[in-house]
Structure formats: C-alpha cells, structure tokens
Amino acid sequence: MRLQGLFFATSLQTLGASTSVDQGAAKACRLLKESLPELVYFPGAAQYVNDTAHWAISSQQNATCSVEPQSADDVSTIVKIIGRSDVRAPFAVRSGGHAYNLGQSSTPGVQVSLTQFTNISYDAEKETVKIGMGLTWAQVYEYLEPLGVMVAGGRINPVGVGGLSLGGGYSWKTNQYGLTIDTIVAHELVLPTGEQVHVTNSSYPDLFFALRGGLNNFGVVTEITYEAHPQTLVYGGLTTYATDNEAIALLNSAASKFSLKSTDPKAQMIVNYASVNGEFIAQTLIFYDGPTPPAGVYDEFLAIPSVSTNVRTSTFREFMASSEGALSADAFGVAQHAIPITKYTVPVLEEMIAQVTAFGQRLTEQNNGSSILVVVQPEPFYQPFTHSHGGAYPHSSDRELTPACPFIVYSANASDPLDVQQARHDYFVSELRNFTHLIQAKAVEEGVSRWDDILYPNYALVDTPLELVYGGNVPRLRRMAAKYDPERLMTLTGGFRFLD
C-alpha cells in the first residue's frame, strides 16, 4: 500500500459496480471459456473475487468475467480473442491491484489476472533475477533474502511487481542503482498482436525504451529480469513525532538539511505529514542500506521528541514489515497525484503542513461521520536519476526530480449507486487538485519546482496531459504504439493512452 506509516489492513470485497454488460465483453468471455475452459471465472466464483479485488474502491470495477492465464501462450490466446473485430472487448491486466486510477488495472469487461505467473529464479553467475508478474514484492523479498541479494523493487510489501516495474519504480535502492526500470535487463512481452517477444536493449531497443515507464501501452508483460545486488542487514524504521511547534520545527529543519546536504547514496527516507480525521500527524520512515549509518546521517531526527519509534538494525524484510500499521477500513477511496520537486526547503515543508492541516480540518468538518485522511509525503532522494538508462518516463540527470506524493483517503460505501460513488470520488479529486496546486505553487516560488516539470506516471492522475508525464517522448511513443499495436488493442484498456 502507498500510505507510508498510515497503512490500512483492508477487507477487500467486490466493491465497485459495473456498467451494463458490454456485448463485446460478454462475447469475449464466452469465447474465452470455450478456448480456456479451466481458466475463466464469473461473478460468484472465489477466483473471480480475487481477480477483480483492488486495494481501493475507487479503482475497482465488476468485470464481466476474469481469466487467469498460466502461460504466455494463454495470454496470446486472450489478446487475440479480445481484439477480434467482432469482439473488441474492454479489458484490463491486473498484477497487484494497487493502481490508483480507475481502469488502469480494472474493467467492466474482461479482467486478465496474472496471479498464476509466480515463477522466480536467481542466476548467481549473471547476477540477475527473473520474476513473474503475478508476485508481490513481499514474495520477491522472501525468496531473495536467504540468498543474500535483493532487487531495486517496491517500498510497500503488498504491491504487485508488474505495475511498479512498468511505471518507473522508486525504491529503497534508487540512490544507489536508479529506479526499478533502470535495473531491468529483459522483458517477456506478449504484443497486442499475440506475438511473444523477448525484449532487451539489443533485441528490441525501441520496445525496451517504451517499457521503461510506458505502463500498459505495448502489450502484456509476463516476466521481467532484473539486476540483483548484494544485501546486508539494514537500519531504519518508522517514527511518529510529537506535534508541538518546537518538535515540528526541528523535523522540518532536519528534513530540509537531509534533502539539501545528504550525499550518502545508502541513506533514504520518506516524511509523512498527515491529517487523520482533523488530527495532525508527523512521521518519518528512514532507511540505511547497512547495519549502522555513519554518525550524523539521522542524528537530528533521532533527537526530536517522539511518540513512538521502531528504528533499529534488522533484516531487509523486517524493515519492510516495520512500516505497516494497524489502522483499518472496510471500504475506502483514494485520490492521488504527484508534485515534482528537486529539493525540499523549510518553506516548502511548512507549506505542506499548512495545507495538510487546512484541508484536513475542512474536509473532516464537511464530511461529518466519514473518515478522512489528507496526506503529503516528501520523498528526498540523492541524485535519483544518476543511474538513468532513459526510457518512456523522462528521468534525466540534467534535472533530478523527486515525486512528492499528495493524496486523500476517504471512507466509501460499497452499496452506494455507481453515480454516487463517482460523484464522491470526483469531489475528492477536485480537492486534491487544489491541495496539490497550492503546494507546488510554493515550490515554484522557492525555485525547486517548475509548472512544466514531469510527473511520475505511477502517481499522476489519469487525466494528466501526456506531455506532463512523458514530455518530449510523446511523439516517439505514439509512433511506436501505432507500429506494435496496429489494431489499437490497448485502447480498450485504461491508463495513459498514446493512441486514440
């Protein structure tokens, strides 16, 4: 989950209501059942519930059917049926169910679930790891830790491997090795035509470029090969601070100094400013890729009065578990975006707190009886783009950006009509836009952001203009999408689209 330090232990149900059954989807499901009889499921089946379940009600839909391919050949069969001229069914591919935008990994049509792609293997000679797209990062880390190696994967355990790896992938290893997409060696891809290809920088350099941040525009990725790196014990954990003025001033000062002055690539952190039902909370999740950080790296943070802390030396997996809390919700929606910031100055951090407090109090008052969280998470990195190998997501070392993460979490009612759920979500998205704009305006004023800075694909709202996500790469990506998807199959799914 993407709520650092404010995690939800969710009870996922079939929350979203679908639109009227699409005739193309109904036909596709019938044909899929004929071709893959043991792999297709309909409402009422346990597998269907698992296949369509998403982390948040705001990104979940009731599919006409779900299908669990077991091989790349099965995926090829699926895309060929879905794309037939007499079918053309809406569909989505689900790897972990943590996509924030409706339609990015959910659909009222055919839900393709990669849950069966759970293969993982480590090649010690090549120092690479092959990972199936049905795994979560928790499962990957469980396999790798006894081997003494790790990959630059997700910072949240339950997140699926596929979505993060195709959208960028900020990791606890990013300062050292780059984004997840910078550590990928190869993709196993089923093209929209059904052809299966092994994509490397040598075999298909154009597709290799496109898959580094291009999300779900170029087919279905079933397996990825990543660089592996040695893993020792680590140091870190979650701290919740006192919220008096003195403690918060000390936190802002320490966070700004860390952002502006830290040059140790093994040191990373996330700051969490949140309003939980109108109550302000300040936290940090610190990480050092080694058993003991050098003196001075986190000393200022550790000296600030705290309410609780679990900072210690541990295994990597123990650290990952240390950031998970116990706050729960049966059904909730999430509106999330991104703020591109180069460095975090004290005035920017103060503005974040001011807006979190103001929006949190107002939204809590206006939504009496509903749980409301307003959050922004500064994510200071040290030269995160230094190891960039390029790709669809522009992340050049010429301008090192960090993806500050603002979001609003709200309680939702699964039994509400679809139009009521949508109106409620639209309301919070509108509030989020204002919240994000005010913070970025301060960052622009401080000279640490620009209005034309690129937004991180995995965080950005789905209606963000393509040029703000992919910059000057848009024309190239449009040409490539037309080349590899001549029948425009991928326009039948949601997300950032390069073809109309």
Image: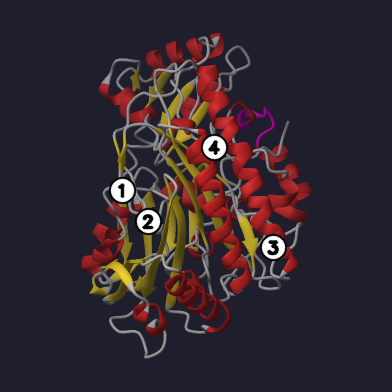
Which residue lies under the disc numbered 2?
A: 130
383 or 232, nearer to the observer: 383
Which kind of residue does numbered mark 3 sit on? Lys
Disc sitting over residue 119 in the figure: 1
What residue lies at 29% left-to-right and 15% top-to-bottom? 44
The answer to the question of whether label 2 and label 1 lie on touching residues, with beta carbons closer than 8 A, is: yes
Dot 2 falls on a residue whose secondary structure is strand
Location of mark 4 (residue): 101
Direction from residue 488 to residue 459 in the image, left or right: left
Q: Are marks 3 and 4 in contact (CB under 8 Å)?
A: no
Q: Earlier in the sequence, mark 4 or mark 1?
A: 4
Of tags 2 and 4, which is closer to the observer? 4
x%, y% of residue 118? 31, 45
What secondary structure characterizes most of the magenta part? loop
Above or below, 79 against 10 in this view is above
Q: Earlier in the sequence, mark 2 or mark 4?
A: 4
